[in-house]
Image: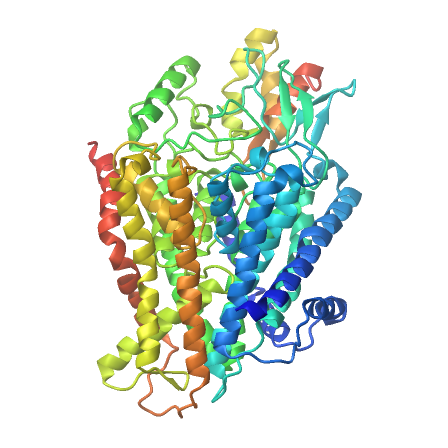
Amino acid sequence: MQLHDFGLILAFFVLVLAPAPWLGRYLYRAMEGQRTLLTPLLQPLERLCYRVAGVDPGAGQDWKRYTGALLAFNAVGLVLLFLILVGQGALPLNPQHLPGMEWSLAFNTAVSFVTNTNWQAYSGEASLSYFSQMLGLAVQNFVSPAVGLAVLVVFCRGIARRSTADLGNFWVDLTRATLYGLLPFCLVLALLLVWQGVPQSLHAYVQAHTLAGGEQSIPLGPAASQIAIKQLGTNGGGFFGVNSAHPFENPTAWSNLLEVAAIILIPVALLFTFGHYVGDRRQSRALLASMLILFVLGLGATLWAELRPNPALAALPVEQIGSLEGKESRFGSVASALWAVTTTAASNGSVNAMHDSFSALGGLVPLFNMMLGEVIFGGVGAGLYGMLLFVLITVFLAGLMIGRTPEYLGKKLEAREVRLLVATLLVMPLGVLVPAALAACLPGAAAAVSNPGAHGFSQILYAYTSGTANNGSAFAGFGANTPYHNLMIALAMLLGRFGYILPVLAIAGSLAAKTRAPQGSGSFPTHGPLFVVLLTLTLLLVGGLTFLPSLALGPLAEHFAAVGGA
Amino acid sequence: MFHHLRPAIASLLALTLVTGVAYPLVVTALAQATFPEQANGSLVRDARGTLRGSALLAQPADGPQWFHPRPSAADYASVPSGASNLAADNPALAERIAADARALAVPGQGPVPLALVTTSASGLDPHLPPAAARYQVARIAAARGLPVEALERLVAQHTRHPAVGPAVVNVLALNLALANRAGL
């Protein structure tokens, strides 16, 4: 590690942590309709949206109506995006005259963007028109994190409100999250990215005559606007096929810093938003501490693994430094490792280096981050409601240990909530292990594997983990664009998204209906170091242990074979 | 769920107009006004105005007289770009690197810089670490009949040291300087 490496890591933490308390308060006020700095600018637009949608912003919804509205919105979004992708050949803004997408790929892509996953089995510059990018994908890039944020604030209201069925209004939460929570920040980030070199143009691709006498086609497009929301909305779907490794998506070390910080800016701030909802900032700090512990451990392990020379090249007359296969010169090993850990902690599927070519342990950490269910900061909204589920599980386990009815912030956890909690614990194993095992057994499905040995199994495992965790990154050698994998990964993405959202909304509804029990001396405090340790261990044991056998077959086997020289 | 359909469709259309039409058009207008060069792909033209490429995209440069960019798994294709995605323990990776290192090794100059024998993530990496550029100087000096020191100065001139990333040198900038004999 050199001076600029420490500079990068320090700048990253400062950019992410310093604005979080302020930003968290802003998001709380915006989501609750209180006055913010941007209210005078955005309120007319917000009111116009309600008028167009025919929505009464004052009408509260119970959890069932809220869920119905959310599902209707996602269903309509899915259908519209599918139709745009299949029909782009007949739509405007298509200067390269690209044809419509094949149906299984279009279905996979539509599910992928609606569920905030951004798994990409296609290459943007070769398959998507500007219309599909702007009016199809970019719109879901905004509204899918907005839906995540809406679900989170409903969970917060469920904890904070007493004896009520009213959890807020989905259409209002959706509109405010999009207009106040995402749009202004995207505008600023997009312009910063253009300044660093990201294109923003509606011009067709241009032809250059290279110095060596060849021809080069230079792809363009409205890239900066889309990359800004791709990062801030924890989406990750690249405008170009190789994603944030593409020099047009991420041209400099500075653009890289801005983008990697943008990825977890909002998820970190939301911890403080939660503190405002429940009126207790100690809760925010405890969750932040637990997430930071896991983040720093993962970052340390990945840096260590990626800075070691590849043992397979030890005997060759080449420089013995951390591998640069699948990495860009302007990032090197450190910025690539930081990116991999950040994107998989958050549910952002972008890559600035090819995870497939990482060392075995360098690939294990991203995989493990996703297997925890993307709760180390996680996706916008989705990360924190996933973490709060683990908090409730920890409180339940602690309740068992001390022999009292478990309660969280004054709300008793009873049989109904615990049943729903256990259901959410099954989502990751069901979405990852079952289809990965199937894919490893079916000869047609296993043909997608491109690397030999244990790493080949890791490729399958990574694909289904990424899908179910709604991450979207890949061991990209995996040939995912077949009807089988397109459909199976689409199912995994749907399970991973709605398998959490539905129980979370149901738990929120049942918590909101309860009265607040007074905090007694026997209540288990959910802040302070003891709880942080307990929560972190619960995450590792309950969330992680399920996957240990599969990790042993994939990256761990690969690692021991590599260092053992087998 | 069906009584939610009207607000669902109307909300989606309203938000599409805001985030899918107004937002990218506003960003395009602002970007074209403030940073037109970057917004249009950082295009590089020669003295006669011919478009030679983009400062941000590597292009193939064969022949001993040019600085070579990092190898590209997709042969510098820009539509679509691509990576090798070879696993660290894939025998094909070690075999390819061994063959390339044999071809590139310069006696007396130490081991081959890793950047010259590994394919980048994008296949379009426009940069080299300065050491990987310097490793090619002797070959270019011989092919062009130029003094080694002048080429080393050229590399140093074009090296950038960002505070948050590794030092890099832009290969197209070096080759343009060679083509124009600028600074030599």
Compared to residue A33, the image places residue A494 above or below, namely above
- Residue in the foreground of this view, choosing between B143 and A458: A458
In the picture, the quarter occupied by the C terminus of chain B is: top right
The residue lying at 44 percent from left, 34 percent from top is A326
- Residue in the foreground of this view, choosing between B172 and A535: A535
Whether residue A231 is visible here, answered yes or no, is no
In percent of width and height, residue B69 lies at: 54, 23
The residue lying at 60 percent from left, 46 percent from top is A84
In percent of width and height, residue A527 lies at: 39, 77
Q: How many marks?
A: 0
Which of the 4 image quarters holds residue B144? top right
- Residue in the foreground of this view, choosing between B150 and A441: A441
In percent of width and height, residue A301 lies at: 34, 49
Q: Residue furthest front?
A: B2
Compared to residue A287, the image places residue A436 above or below, namely above
Q: Report the side of A37 relative to A243 (left or right).
A: right
Which of the 4 image quarters holds residue B145? top right
Compared to residue A33, the image places residue B6 above or below, namely above
The residue lying at 22 percent from left, 36 percent from top is A561
In percent of width and height, residue A298 lies at: 37, 53
Whether residue B7 is visible here, answered yes or no, is yes
The type of colouring in the image is rainbow
Which of the 4 image quarters holds residue A533? bottom left
